[in-house]
Image (tube, helix red, strand yellow):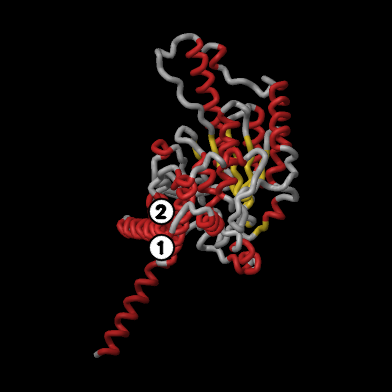
Amino acid sequence: MGATHLPSTEFDGTDMDDQLEAAAEARLGNPATPMVQLLGPDGVLGTDPVFSEYAQRLDAEKLRGFYADMAAIRRFDQEATALQRQGQLALWVPLTGQEAAQIGSGRASQPQDYIFPTYREHGVALTRNVDLAELLRQFRGISNGGWNPKDTNFHLYTLVLAAQTPHAVGYAMGIQRDQKLAAATAAAGDAGGQAPEPKAAVVVYFGDGASSEGDVHESMVFASSYNAPVVFFCQNNHWAISVPSSVQTRIPLSNRAKGYGFPGIRVDGNDVIAVHAVTEWALEHAREGKGPVLIEAFTYRVGAHTTADDPTKYRESAEEALWRAKDPLERLEKYLRTEGLADEAFFAQVKADGDELAAYVRKTTYDLETPDIRTAFANTYVEAHPLVAEELAWFEEYSAGFADEATADRADTGAAHS
């Protein structure tokens, strides 16, 4: 194996690392400065010395597309929540309130980029052309995934907090080495006349709660040491189930990037235009070999953590009302209407498309096979285990009790009618 095939080490390019850090600071300024916001809650578009340039690339069609995507994924979220309440899904993880963070960042990625989600990135899945009905297979309990990541460069959901972050950095380092090998091959004249592959980067999503996991910190150390082309996208939705973000950190999460030696940006996560601009900048930064970026999307989980959660037990309704006034769909709708970029026919069509999506998702879910929980017992260990057998026996007895009650109820009903 030639020297060009060997991975670089953390000791390579130290001077260059310092230069890149200085350049990032010169452009982005002090990381303690306020968050990036372009479209305010009042629907008025502001300016930013760095990111307005990226916002100006968005035409009316793309802005309408952002709104249609956010409306579609909210309608999907509502339908999936209803399906869980009706017993069609074992669990659901809502995203309402985080549509701008997901659609804005997802639409900023390119097809060759690879995405590592957690378990709430339904909006990002939409932007990567994942069949939304396929998302529900895992939550119905009949699949460990639901889609083929190779088809969309959108990885399977990760239910273990932060486990996807080291995977993302490893994948980014693989991209980095593939690109180095391709460049060396081209320089040696062995490319065979083939056009070079477009440069790629990785985006990895995690929440404010997961930011406290060791996996995130270890991943950032590796990403910085090896200058990996990865964008860490933290959706700070203020609540890690019942634990507020103030317990996770005493400073803006984006400031942590400074400790690892790469840029950190805090963006208004309910402003789809700003999120798109910041993510586009970060991905360009990563693809061009300038290293990782941390984005903190400052947003809010309006609903429950999952359908097994009751947020009224740990937070005030006034807080929810405050954030509902910052709704990402409403602010973009105000802008589209004020600027004459969308008419009533457009919004009517968006609603009709949402209803059509909901009907499709509902029918597809009803058509799925009914999960058998006994499969979970069978797949726990390769070989039979006495504790699992004991728990299965308890479950069988517990389930039989419902059948006995149903039989007794039918008998009582029959006796009452005779």
Number of residues whose C-alpha sits closer than 10 Å to that of mark 2, classed few (under 14), some (14–19) or many (20 or more): many
Identity, as a three-letter code, of the amino acid under mark 2? Leu
**Residue 378 screen position, x and y as percent:** 40, 51
The extreme left residue here reads 418
SS label for mark 2: helix
Pointer 2 residue? 136
Is 286 located above or below residue 322 in the figure?
above
Residue at coordinates 40% horizontally, 14% vertically from top-left?
193
Is 11 on the left-hand or right-hand side of 134? right
- Does residue 281 appear anywhere in the picture? yes
The amino acid beneath tag 1 is Leu
- The residue located at (46%, 32%) in the rendering is 112
The quarter of the picture where the C terminus appears is bottom left
Indicate whether 325 appears above or below 227: below
- Answer yes or no: is residue 394 visible: no
Task: In the rendered structure, find residue 83 and report the number of the disc placed on it.
Answer: 1
Residue at 40% from the left image edge and 17% from the top image edge = 194
Nearest to N terminus: mark 2 or mark 1: 1
Return the residue nearer the eye: 31 or 342: 342
Outermost residue to the top: 188
Tell me the SS state at disc 1: helix
Structural distance between the alpha carbons of marks 2 and 1: 10 Å
Asked if disc 2 and disc 1 are in contact, CB closer than 8 Å, the reply is yes
Viewer-side residue, 58 vs 128 = 58
Q: Position of residue 257 (x, y in %)?
A: 69, 38
Nearer the observer, 235 or 139: 235
Decide: few, some or many residues near mark 1? Use Cα within 10 Å; few <14, some 14-19, many ≥20. many
Residue 404's quadrant in the figure? bottom left
